[in-house]
Image (spheres, helix red, strand yellow):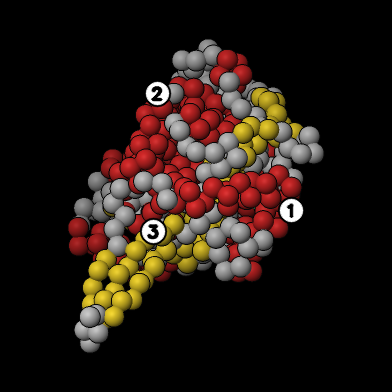
Amino acid sequence: MSAPSTAVDLRDVLAGVPTGLFIAGRWRGATSGRIMPVENPATRQILTHVADAGVEDAQAAVTAAAAAQNAWAATPPRMRSDILRLTYERITARTDELAAVMTAEMGKPLAEARGEVTYGAEFFRWFSEEATRLNGSYGTTPDGRTRMITMRRPVGPCLLITPWNFPLAMGARKIAPAIAAGCTIVFKPAPQTPLTALLLTDILHESGLPDGVLNVITTSQAADVIEPVMCGGVLRKLSFTGSTAVGKTLLEHASHTVMRTSMELGGNAAFIVFDDADLDTAVEAAFAAKMRNMGEACTAANRIYVQHGIAEQFTAALSQRMSALVVGDGLRDGVQVGPLIDAPSHRKITGLVQDAVAHGATIVGQADLPDGDGYFYPPTVLFAPGPDSRILRTEIFGPVATVIPFDTEDDVVQAANGTPWGLVGYVATRDLNRALRVAERLEVGMVGINTGIVSNPAAPFGGVKESGLGREGGHVGIEEYLEYRYVAIPAG
Ligand code: NAP
């Protein structure tokens, strides 16, 4: 196996990552003194331990966020903008360090981790620019009797909960617009990947974010710790990224105090390849849509529908591409696919592939596995699983590409829409009319045409149906953290 390829020494980097809770501008341990381990999924070794917050710590974070809210809302937008811009610059300057930490705790190869740092940093730059453009309006009622002013106000203290698959970007997509809008924050990152989030917190603190604006709690007892603070009436907004099942539970909690919610939930994306598609473009786009983040992405192409005329060629080319991938520890040179996040994820994907084969699927290509204890799963191409296969109805969240042949446009649109999810869909064709027609018919929040990557900080990211509520990024991303206030004045 090749040597580690980090430009920084991981031990040095880890030594500089805070491991406490960050409350009211101060790092401290959990009140109970409890800590929890952070594992490297490529080696199963424990990297370090972080504080394991209990309910009292979460309450302290909420109290700190509430105490800071009014002053933060009154801060000049330019100051909020400058802090965000400085954060963007500092993240960018520390790309290697952040990427190494991310790879060590999450598993993705260093090149992908660096890509995520760039992507995540861009949210700070984007929202630094949005922070100074929060305008209201002035008008008159139709009968001419009343002047109407609308102003934009921050929604108030926000709870931000993120998953492990994009440890920097998922936090950035929420923290940056919340800061830009003048909201204070309680942030709970995923327990598998707290270190990137804690390093980001340190960078925001160094960039001049006032005490209490961002409070961070890491915990192994999310359900017990979060429900009481959500029902406490102080937090005004929840922004959650994670699974649809957990999202539904949190929506129930949010209903107790009618919290505003933004929900970025699971997906089951269809990638549709028509006969007339350029083969190379279609294969590259499907590969990107499947393998970004090793398949551990909500936008991952879960079902790749290919029209009969091109199905054989497409499957062979995709299979060749997937089988050639180098799997291993993402910190090492030349590795293109890292481990899955943990043992349950490995068990789930193993079971889905076994079930698909039992329902008629053929394994047409599979990469080699490295030696070692990591949670490695080989990139795999499955052809034609039967309609009852669980893999068609489950978010795979791993490096398994499932190819399903189809006949007509109507058939494939019906199949693509035949799921409770609706995050993203993809279309590969040279016919612009067909591309737009199918984009109009797909029940999704986003569509990629002849591309497998749709995410961009300047674009509104989000889904319909059980994939969620609200949008992150773009001009609308900040709306999630703002309320309208209307002021009526009699016209005199
Ligand atoms: P998850 O199990 O839903 O967990 C997400 C976060 O919620 C974690 O921090 C988790 O902490 C926390 N959590 C779980 N139960 C909770 C509860 N009862 N109260 C409060 N917090 C709770 O999802 P995941 O496995 O980390 O991430 C994968 C999922 O995220 C996939 O479904 C993927 O599609 C989705 N995702 C969606 C988007 C999008 O933009 N639509 C982006 C990325 C990922 P614990 O782990 O400690 O429970």
Find disc 3 in the rendering and name its residue. Answer: 479
Viewer-closest of 444 and 163: 163
Give the image location of residue 462, x and y in percent: 42, 56
Q: Residues within 10 Å of mark 1 (few under 14, many from 20)?
A: few
Mark-to-mark CA distance, 3 and 2: 29 Å
Q: Is residue 353 visible?
A: no
Task: State the quadrant of the N terminus.
Answer: top right
> Given the image, on which type of amino acid does mark 3 rest?
Glu
- Residue lying at 50% horizontally and 57% vertically, measured from the top left: 156
> Given the image, on which type of amino acid does mark 2 rest?
Ala
Task: State the quadrant of the C terminus.
Answer: bottom left
Marked residue nearer the N-terminal end (1 or 3): 1
Q: Residues within 10 Å of mark 3 (few under 14, many from 20)?
A: many
Find disc 2 in the rendering and name its residue. Answer: 93
Q: Is residue 372 visible?
A: yes
State the image quarter where residue 214 is shown. Answer: top right
Q: Residues within 10 Å of mark 2 (few under 14, many from 20)?
A: few
Viewer-closest of 118 and 185: 185
For residue 368, side relative to residue 430 (left or right)? right
| Disc ID at residue 224 | 1
Give the image location of residue 328, x and y in percent: 55, 25
Question: Quick check: marks 1 and 3 in contact, CB under 8 Å?
Answer: no
- Residue lying at 26% horizontally and 76% vertically, measured from the top left: 147
- Residue lying at 78% horizontally and 36% vertically, measured from the top left: 34
Mark-to-mark CA distance, 1 and 3: 30 Å
Mark-to-mark CA distance, 1 and 2: 38 Å
347 shown above or below 154: above
Give the image location of residue 224, x and y in percent: 74, 53
Question: Is the C-beta of the residue carrying label 3 under 8 Å from the nearest atom of ligand 1?
Answer: no
243 shown above or below 14: below
